[in-house]
Image: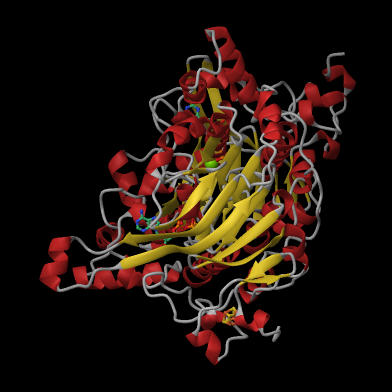
Amino acid sequence: MTETLVGTAAAAGPARPLVQVENLGRVFDVSPPWLNRVIERLPQRLLRAVAGVNFTIDRCETFALVGESGSGKSTVAKMVVGLIPPTTGQVIIDGVSMTNPAHDGQRRALRRRIQMVFQDPYASLNPRWRAFDIIAEPIRAFSLADSRQEIAARVGELLTLVGLDPADGAKYPHEFSGGQRQRIAIARALASEPEFIVCDEPTSALDVSVQAQILNLMRDLQDRLGLTYLFISHNLAVVRHMANRIGVMYLGRLVEVAPSRDLFRAPRHPYTRMLLDAVPDLEMTGRQRKAVEGEIPNPIDPPAGCAFHPRCPFANDRCRAERPEPVAAGAGEVACHAVAEGRI
Amino acid sequence: MTEPVLSVRNLKVEFPTRRGRLTAIDDISFDLMPGEVLGVVGESGAGKSITGTAIIGLIEPPGRIAGGEILLKGRRIDNLPPDAMRKIRGKRIGMVFQDPLTSLNPLYRIGDQLIETVQTHTDLSAAAARNRALALLTEVGIPAPASRIDNYPHQFSGGMRQRVVLALALAAEPELVIADEPTTALDVSVQAQIIALIKRLCRQHGAAVMLITHDMGVIAETADRVAVMYAGRIVEIGPVRDVVKQPHHPYTKGLMGSIPTIATESDRLLQIPGSMPRLTAIPKGCAFHPRCPARFAPCDQVRPELAGRDRSQVACWLYHDVPAPAELQP
Ligand SMILES: Nc1ncnc2c1ncn2[C@@H]1O[C@H](COP(=O)(O)OP(=O)(O)OP(=O)(O)O)[C@@H](O)[C@H]1O
Ligand SMILES: Nc1ncnc2c1ncn2[C@@H]1O[C@H](COP(=O)(O)OP(=O)(O)OP(=O)(O)O)[C@@H](O)[C@H]1O
Ligand code: SF4
Ligand SMILES: [Mg+2]
Ligand SMILES: [Mg+2]
C-alpha cells in the first residue's frame, strides 16, 4: 500500500462522518409473473427488505451489522456502495450522495475510494480471468501503476498479503479452493487502495487460522492507512474483535446500535440478548445453547407493532400494536418499548 | 460389527497442471459409521472439498482419482460408470456444495428445482412433490415458504440460498450426506436449527454425515469425530472432545488457538506464522514443519504417518518412535 492515503484521510479533517445512512429503505417486488397473477388472481407481493435504517460511520471506524439471515444486511451493503438504488432515504459518503443525479461527477471520483467484498466470492470473480488479471484490473482501471513490472510487483504483494503465493496469479478461479477465492476477492478490493471497504461476510469461507491472518491484516491496514469498514458477519466473535460499533438488524430494521463493548457486556434489546445466548459453546461445558425461540417472521407480511413481538418474552399489548422507535440508551440507541419503559 | 456407510481407503487425487503434477489428496483413509457425523476441518486449500467431490465422483477432468478406493455400504463406487454414479448421487449420497450456485440454476424458481429433485428420486405426484418441497423449506427454516417457493434464487438472501441447497440434498433422504460448509453464511439461530436437522437425519434414518466446516462451534456441537486436514493429508483424527479440548498435532493446536471468542477482547488474534505450502512444492518430511514451533530432528527428513494413540490418531513425530539417527541425513 502506498502511504498517500494517510495524508488524504487526515487532511479531510472536519468531524463529518465519512458515511451517513439516512432513513434508508428498500422494497422488492416478489410477485409471481404478471400473467399468472392476472389469471390466478394473485395479489402483488412486496417485500420490505430494509426500512428506516439510520447510522453513520466515522473515518477509521469499523461499523458492523449483525442479524438473522434475511434481515437485510446485504441489501443495506449494496445500497451503501450504490449497487442497488434505495426506495426511500439516501446514503451520503464524504458529502456526496450516492443517488442524487446532481452528484454524478463527484460520485465517479468516489468510486476508487470505495470497494466491496461480496458475500458470494464465486459470483464476484470472472471465471475466465486469471487471478492476476482479476487483481490487476482495478490497478489498471484507475492508473495506479505505470509499468507492467510495477503492476506485477503490486499484484504479487497483494497475493502475499492474503497468504497466497505470487505464482498463484496464473491460476483461474475454479482452480482455487473456496477460501482461496475469498482471499482473491479481498486482494482485489485492496488493489485500488480504497478508503472505505464494505465487507459482506469477508471471512465466512476461511478456516480460523487464515481468518485470523486476514482479520489481523484488515486491522493493520486500518491503523496504517486510516481505512473505514462496514463489516457484516454472522459470527459474533469476529464482530466483537473487529467492530467499534455494532448495529443489530431484525426484519429490515435496526433494533439496537451500541459500542461493541457495551453490546457484549450489556445487550439491551431482547433480540440482541437472545442472539448472544444462542452462541455455540466451544468450551464444551455441556451448556446447552438456547435456541432462539419462535417462528422467523415473514418479511412480506411482517407482524404489527414491534416485528419481534411474536418471539419476545417481554412483549405486551403495546408491543403488539405500536412500532417502537429508536431511543437513546447508554451510548447507543434501542428500539424497544420494554427498554424505553424501563421494564427490562 | 456394523458395516460402515462410507469407507475411504488410501485415496489419492491429482491435478496435472502447467507446472507439473499437483497432489491435492495424498493417501487419506477414514470410515463413517451409520448415524455418525464426521467433522472435517483444516487449512483453506487443504483438500476438504476435493475429498467430498471425489466421493461423489465429480472431480473435474483433467483432475483424477490416482489411487485408493471408495466404498459405499461395502460396494466400490469410485470405479462405477458415469450412469451408475449419477443414480447414486442425489438418491443415496446427498451433497451440499460449498458454492450454493453450483446446485441452484439461476433461471428456475426455487420450488421447481426442489420439486424436480423430489420427483427424480421418488414416485410422488406433482402435487405431493410440491407439498414435500414446502415441508423441506420449512425444515430448513425459510419463513412463510408458501409465499417464497416461486421466487428465483437471486431473490433469496445468501443464507437462504444456502438452506435451499441443503433442502435439495436432503430431498431423497440419502444414506450419506456430504455437507461442505453448510452453515457458513448463517447466523447462530438458524445454524442451531440446521444442526438439529442434521442430527435428526442421523438419528432417524441412520444416515452418516461428513460435515466440512471451519466453524469449531458447529463441530463441537454436531460432530462425533473430527478429522483435521493439512496439505492434502489427515494430520489428526479422533473423538471431537479429544481433538477440540486436547489437540495433539501442533497444527491443530495452532488452529484452536486462533479462534476468536465472544468472551474476550484482544487486539490481535493468534495466527500460525507463514502459510500452507503450495501443493506443487510440499516440503520433505512433515508438510507442517516450516511453520511448526515444536519441530525437531526427524521432521524435515521423514514424513510421519497417521498412527494411533488410544482413540485418536496423529501424524506427528512428537508422538511416535523417532527413526534411528542413521536413517536421517545430518
Ligand atoms: N433482488 C431481490 N429480489 C427480491 N427479494 C430480495 C432481493 N434481494 C434480497 N431480497 C430479500 O430481502 C431480504 C433481505 O435479504 P438480504 O440479502 O439483505 O439479507 P441478509 O441479511 O444479507 O441475509 P444473509 O445473512 O442470509 O445473507 C430477504 O428476505 C431476501 O429474500
Ligand atoms: N481444478 C483444479 N485444478 C488445480 N488445482 C485445484 C483444482 N481444484 C482445487 N485445486 C487445489 O486443490 C487444493 C484443495 O482444494 P479444496 O477445494 O479441496 O480445498 P478446501 O480444503 O476445501 O479449502 P477451503 O477451506 O478454502 O474451501 C487447493 O489448494 C486448490 O488450489
Ligand atoms: S418492543 Fe416489545 S416485543 Fe419488541 S423487543 Fe421490546 S419488549 Fe420485545
Ligand atoms: Mg447477506
Ligand atoms: Mg472447500
**Looking at the image, which residue is at 62% across and 24% down?**
A158
Count of numbered marks = 0
Quarter containing the N terminus of chain B: bottom right
Q: Viewer-proximal residue, B191 or A51?
A: A51
Q: Viewer-proximal residue, B129 or A43?
A: A43
Answer with left or right where residue B81 lies relative to residue B283. left
**Looking at the image, which residue is at 87% across and 27% down?**
B296
Q: Can you give x and y, in whole percent of width and height, for residue B216 in the image?
A: 67, 54
Q: Viewer-proximal residue, B234 or A342?
A: A342
User: Furthest-bottom residue in view?
Assistant: A317
Answer with left or right where residue A335 lies relative to residue B258. left
Q: Is residue B121 above or below residue B12?
A: below
Q: Viewer-proximal residue, A273 or B57?
A: A273
Q: Can you give x and y, in whole percent of width and height, for residue A28 in the image?
A: 34, 60
Q: Can you give x and y, in whole percent of width and height, for residue A244 in the image?
A: 72, 52
Q: Is residue A262 above or below residue A342?
A: above
Q: Is residue A306 above or below residue A187?
A: below
Quarter containing the C terminus of chain B: top right
Answer with left or right where residue A227 lies relative to residue B130. right
Q: Can you give x and y, in whole percent of width and height, for residue B74 in the image?
A: 47, 51
Q: Is any part of residue B58 visible from this angle?
A: yes
**Looking at the image, which residue is at 61% across and 73% down?**
A271
Q: Is residue A77 above or below residue B59?
A: below
In the figure, residue B292 lies in which quadrant? top right
